[in-house]
Image (cartoon, rainbow, N blue to C red):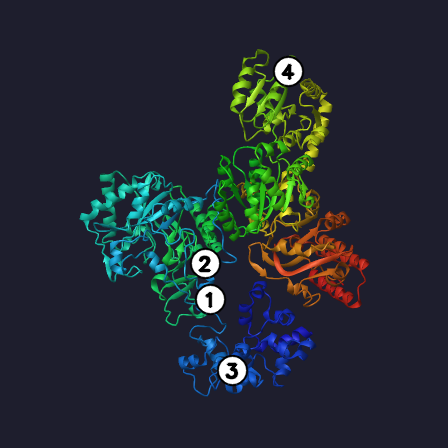
Amino acid sequence: MDTEQSIAQVIEAFFDRGFYLDAYPDVAAAQVDPVLHYVRYGAIERRDPTPEFSTGYYLDTYPDVAASGLNPFWHYLTNGRDEGRSGCPGPQEQMRQYFDAEFYLGKNPDVAAGELDPFVHFCDQGWREGRDPSPSFSLSYYRAEYGIPEGVNPLEHYVSDGQQAGFKPHPYRRADGHCVHDDVRHFTQRSADLYETRDPSIAVNRRLSAQAFAMYLPQFHPIPENDVAWGEGFTEWRNVGRGMPRFKGHYQPRIPEILGHYDLLQSDVMARQVQMANEAGLEGFCFYYYRFNQKRALEKPLEAFVANPDLNCSFMILWANENWTRRWDGLDHDIILQQDYREEDDAALLSDWARYFRDPRYKRINGRPLLVLYRPGIIPDACATIARWRRKLRSEHQVDPYIFMTQGFGCLDPGEFGLDGAMEFPPHKVAHNLPSLIQDLEISDLRFTGQVAAYDAMVANAVMAEPAPYPLLRGVAPSWDNDARRQGGGMTYHGSTPQKYQAWLAEAISYARAHPFEGEALVFINAWNEWAEAAYLEPDVHFGGAYLNATARALTEQSVVTSKDKVVLFSHDAYRHGGQLLVKNMARVLTARYGVEVAIIVLGEGPLVAEYRKIAPTYQVGGDAAELEGVLASLRQDGYRKAIVNTTVSGWVLPYLKAQGYFAVSLIHELPRLIREYNLEPVVKIIAEQADLIVFPARQVEAGFAGVAGDLDSDKCILRSQGSYLPWSSDPQHSTRIRAKLGLKESDKLVINVGYADARKGIDIFLNVAREICARRQDVHFAWIGGTTADVQTWYLEDIAADAPEAGRIHVIPFTDTPVPYYEAADLFFLSSREDPFPTVVLEALKAGLPVVGLQGSGGSTDLIAEFGALVARGNLAGIAAEILGFLDLPEAERQQQAALRQAHIESRFRFEDYVGDLLRMLNPDLQRVSVVVPNYNYKDHLVARLDTVYGQSYPLYEVLVLDDCSADDSLQLLEGYRQQTDREFTLVVNEVNSGSGYRQWDKGMRMSRGDFVWIAEADDTAEPEFLDVALKLLEEEDVAFVFCDSAQRDEHDRLLSASYGYYFDTVEPGAMDRGFVMDGAEFTRRFLSVKNLILNVSGVVWRREALIRALDFTREDHNRMKVACDWKMYAYAAVQGGRVGYVAKALNMHRCHSGSVTHSRDGQQHYDEIVSVQEFIAQQVDLPAEILAKRETYRAELRQQFGLAD
C-alpha cells in the first residue's frame, strides 16, 4: 500500500465528506474523491477535513509538524491527540480575536501603568471586574441580555456558544466593530465599484430587442386623503426617508440623485423623467391608475402627462383595483378609500379609460389598447363583470382593449377571469417559497421582525420558470425592499446589483422574443420610481445611473463594459468644418476602438452637436466660464482627469482645466494669418504657458505658432499629423456613378477639391485654373465638393454659369458626409488653399492614389505634396495648369505605379487610429500598444462572451484581430451582428479553407498585429477585466518575454470544473506558484516546464511581440506535425532565449475545457511522444538536477499507464 493510501485509510473514519464537498465546490465539480483530494492537495492548500479540525491552525501552532511535511490531520489522529495537541483554537485563542489591546490599555490606565499583559489581565481578572475587551463587546449588555451567570466570562461564552447561537455582543455594534452607522455612511455615498454616471448614449441609434414599460407611481405630490391619513404635506418621500439598515450590508436609506426629492406637480420633472426613460431605451411608462367608485386619486401626474403632447413616450394604465388602506400590504385594514365595483359606476370608469385609450401615445397591439388589472381576484363575479366592461367599451366607446392581469395573491391563470393574458409583477409569484436568509445575517435592529431572501434566489426562480400555457408578459424588478414603509417589519430581497438586474432583464427579453404576444415582445419593469419599495430605475446616490445604464444595455444586448480611461474632448463649435469633424472622429475612435470613456464639451453652436451626442455625453457651455467650471467639476467627480483641447480657438479653457487638476493636450491647426485674423494672440500665449503638451501637425504650423507665442518650451511640443479619419469603403461603382452624374465621357479627366469654398481655401484660384484648362481642353472637368459662401455663389458661380466654354464642366457639389466616391472618380486633386495648416483632404486624396497639386507656402502639407505631387507658386496659373495637365496625361502604367506608392505611404504613416492612439499615450505615457488576436473555429456559442471580455478589459486596446478558420456554425453572421450592435471596431480575417492548425492561426495573427504586445485570446475562453492591466505591469520590465496567469476551468456547458490550476502546479513543486513572480527564464524553464507544461492555456498569456515572433519562427516546422505540445515548446524556447518570465497567481483567465478537444482526443502514443520530445528539447537547453529528472521519469510512467503504453 502506498503512502497516500495508508494516510487516506487512517483519516477515512474521521473525515467529513459532506462538509468538505460543501465547503470546497471546486472539489465537488471535479468529481474526485474528497479524502484523496485532501491527502494530495487539500492539506497543502490548508483546507479543513472536518468542522472540528483546522489545518491552518494546526500547522501554524505546531511548526515541527509543518516542517516535517506530514499530513496534519493524519499527525493529529496518530500522534497529536495523545500528545495533548489541539486540532482547533481553544477558548483563549478564540477570545484573542475579539480582544483590542490598545482599547483595553486606553480604558484601563492602571493596567497600562502596571505594565501587565492586557490580554492576560483580562482573562485572569478583567472580565470579573466588568472591563470590556473591545469597543465592540459589552460585557454588561451580553450578560444581561442572555442571562449569563456571574461566574462565567461573557466573552468566553460568546466564542464557545453565543456566536453560533446568533447572540449579539453589543446593543449597537457587532464583534467586528461594524455598526448601523457604518452601513448608513456606506450607502449614502457613491459605490466605489458599481457607481455609474448615467450614459444617455448606450441605446442611441441601436435596435431595441424588446419593448419595455416601467411601472410609474404617481404618489409624489400631496393630496387631501393623504393629509388626513398621514399628516399634512405627506408624499411618498416621507416613507422613503424612514429607511434604515436592519442588518449588516442592508442597502438603506435610498437617496435620489439627479432628480432629488421631486414634486410631480413641478412642470419640468416629468419631462426629465421621460427624457431619461427614452435615453435608456424604455418604450414608456405603465401608470398606476387609482379610482374608487366615482372618485379618482393621485390622478394629477397622469393628467399632466396626457395634457402635454411633447412628452414623447408611450404609456398605458394599470388599475390598482384594491381598497386604499393605511397599510402597505394590500390587506383591508384602516381603509382610506373603498372599492365597491358598483355597476352604476361603470359609465364613469369606462369613459375614463376610453379617454386615455384615444391618446395616440397609448400602447396598442394590433390597434387594440392594452389595459392591466392589478387584482382581478377581488372583483365580485369577475368573469361576468369583466365581460360586461368589454361589451360596454365596444358598444359605447368603439374600443376593444386587450385586458391583462398581474400575477399575485394566488391568482396566476388569466383564463379564470376571462382575461387575455397575465403580467408578472415581481416580487409577486417569482419570490414564492424562497429560503430565508435571516439565520445568516448579522441583525443590527433588535426589534427587527422582517423577512429577508436573496435577490439571486428570486431571479433564479423567475428565470427557471416553465413557459406559461397562456400569454405571459415577463416582469423584473431592479431591487425590492419595503423596509421604508414597514419599519423593520418588511420584506427585503437582498443583494441586487445593476449587473444582476441586467442579467434578469436580458432573460425576460429573451423569453419575450421567444413568446411574443401578437407578434410583439413586451417586458415590464417594477418600477420606475417605487422609492419606498426600493424598486426604481431613477438614479440614486449610491449606484448613480447604473440601473438605467443596465436597462439600456439589456435592451440593446450589450454587456457591461468596465470603465477605462476617461478623456474630455473640446471643440470650439459644432459646424461641419475640419477641426470639428476631427473631434467627432477622435471621439468615435476613442470609444469604439480603444474603449475610452469620452465626454465632449462644445464651446459654441452647430449641427454636429447632435452627432457628438450619439457618440458620447456632450455639454454645450458657450463662453460661460462659470458653467464651464461646473461641468469640469462634475466630470472630475466622475473620474475625468485628462483633456484634449482641439484648435487654438478653444485654448481659453486651459486655465480652468489646470485649476481643477486636469492634464491637458492642445492640438494646434492654425497658421499665423488666421491667428491674427481672429485676434487669437492672447490665447496662443495661454496655450504656450498652460498646456501640458502641444501637438502640431507639421513643422510649418509649429514655427508659425512659436512666432506668435514668443517663448515656447520645446520639451512640450510634439509633431504629429492627424491622419485620415474618413471611413473608406472602396467600390468600383463609385467612379462609374459619379462620372455619369457629372456627365463625363469614358476618356474625360476629373480634377477635384474638397472643403468649404471661401477665399482662404482658394475657391477663386480653383475656378480660374478650371476656366483656363477647360478653355484649352474639352476632356477635363473640375468639381469642388463642399459648402460655399454667399459671395462665392453670387460673384463666381453665376459668372461661370454664364460662360459658355466652361458650362457644364465646372461643378460645385454641396457638402457631403461621403466624399469617397468623388475621390475614386477623380484623376487629380488640386489643393488651391492659400493657407491650410495640414488639410486632411490631402491625405484622403493620396489614400485614393491621386496626385496632388498645391501652392507653395500654403501650410503643413507642402512637403507631402512635393513628394507625391507638385507645388507651384500661387500666382502662376499657367504653371499650375501645366502641372495638372502633366499628371492627367501620364501613361496608365506610370499612373497606377505612382498611385500604389501614394496609397502605401498613407497606409503606413497616416492611419487615423494610430494618431488617436498616440494622443492617448500622450495623456498616459505608460500606455502600451496591445494587439489582441482572437482565433475562432466554430465557437459561435462562446464568441460574444469572448469579445465582451476582450472589450471589457480595463486596459485600452490598440487593435483586435478576429481570425476565423473557415467556421461552419454561423460565426461570421454573429460577428457582423456584434460589430453593428456594439459599435466596437475589429479586423475580421476569414480563411476560405481551414488551416488545419491552431498554431498556424496564432502565427498569422502575430504577423498581422502591429502592437508591441500580443494577447492570443482563444474564442472560447474569457478573462477578468483586469487581466491585461495586471499582466502589462509585469511586462514593464524590458527583459520579460511573456507573462501568464493562473486559470479557472469551465466545460463547454459553462460548468465550473476548478477555480484554479493550483492543484496541477503543485504536482511539480508544491506551493511554489501560490504567489506571483518575475523569474529568470532559464530557472523558470528548469523548475516549471522541464517535467510538464504548467502554462495550460495560451489565452492566459501576454507576449512581448518580438519574443512571440522568435518562438513561432523556431517552432514553425512543428505547427502541423505537433498537435498538443507545440505551445509548450514555444514557451520553453521563449523563456531560455534570455530574459525573464512573469507569473500572476490569480485566476484572471477562464480556460474552456471541451470534452472533445485536441488535448483530450489524440492518439496516446503521439501524445506521449510529443511530451517526451519537448522534455528532451528542454534538457538540451538547461541543466536538470537529479530530482527533476526523477520527476520527469515519474511523469512519463504515469503517462504510459494513462495511455496504456508499454514501458
Amino acid at circle 4: Glu
Query: How far apart, in angstroms, are the residues tagged by discs 2 and 3?
Result: 44 Å
Q: Which mark is residue 265?
A: none
Mark 2 or 4: the one toward you: 4
Which residue in the structure is indicated by mark 3?
108
Labels 4 and 1: the sequence-earlier one: 1
Amino acid at circle 3: Asn
Dot 2: element: loop
Q: Which mark is residue 182?
A: 1
Query: How far apart, in angstroms, are the residues tagged by discs 1 and 2?
Result: 19 Å
Which residue in the structure is indicated by mark 4?
772
Give x and y (percent) for residue 211. 41, 44
Dot 3: element: loop
**As drawn, which residue projects farthest toward the top?**
804
Amino acid at circle 1: Asp
Which residue in the structure is indicated by mark 2?
496
Labels 3 and 4: the sequence-earlier one: 3
Labels 2 and 3: the sequence-earlier one: 3
Dot 1: element: helix
Give x and y (percent) for residue 106. 52, 79
How busy is the neighbourhood of tag 1: few (under 14 within 10 Å), some, or many (20 plus)?
some
Query: How far apart, in angstroms, are the residues tagged by discs 3 and 4?
Result: 104 Å
The C terminus sits in image quarter: bottom right
Labels 1 and 3: the sequence-earlier one: 3
- Residue 27, compared with residue 669, is above or below; it is below
How busy is the neighbourhood of tag 3: few (under 14 within 10 Å), some, or many (20 plus)?
some
Query: How far apart, in angstroms, are the residues tagged by discs 4 and 1?
Result: 82 Å
Tell me the residue at 76%/54% (across/down). 1133
> Is residue 159 rendered to the left or right of residue 774?
left
Labels 2 and 4: the sequence-earlier one: 2
Q: Nearer the viewer, residue 504 or 780?
A: 780
Q: Quadrant location of residue 724? A: top right
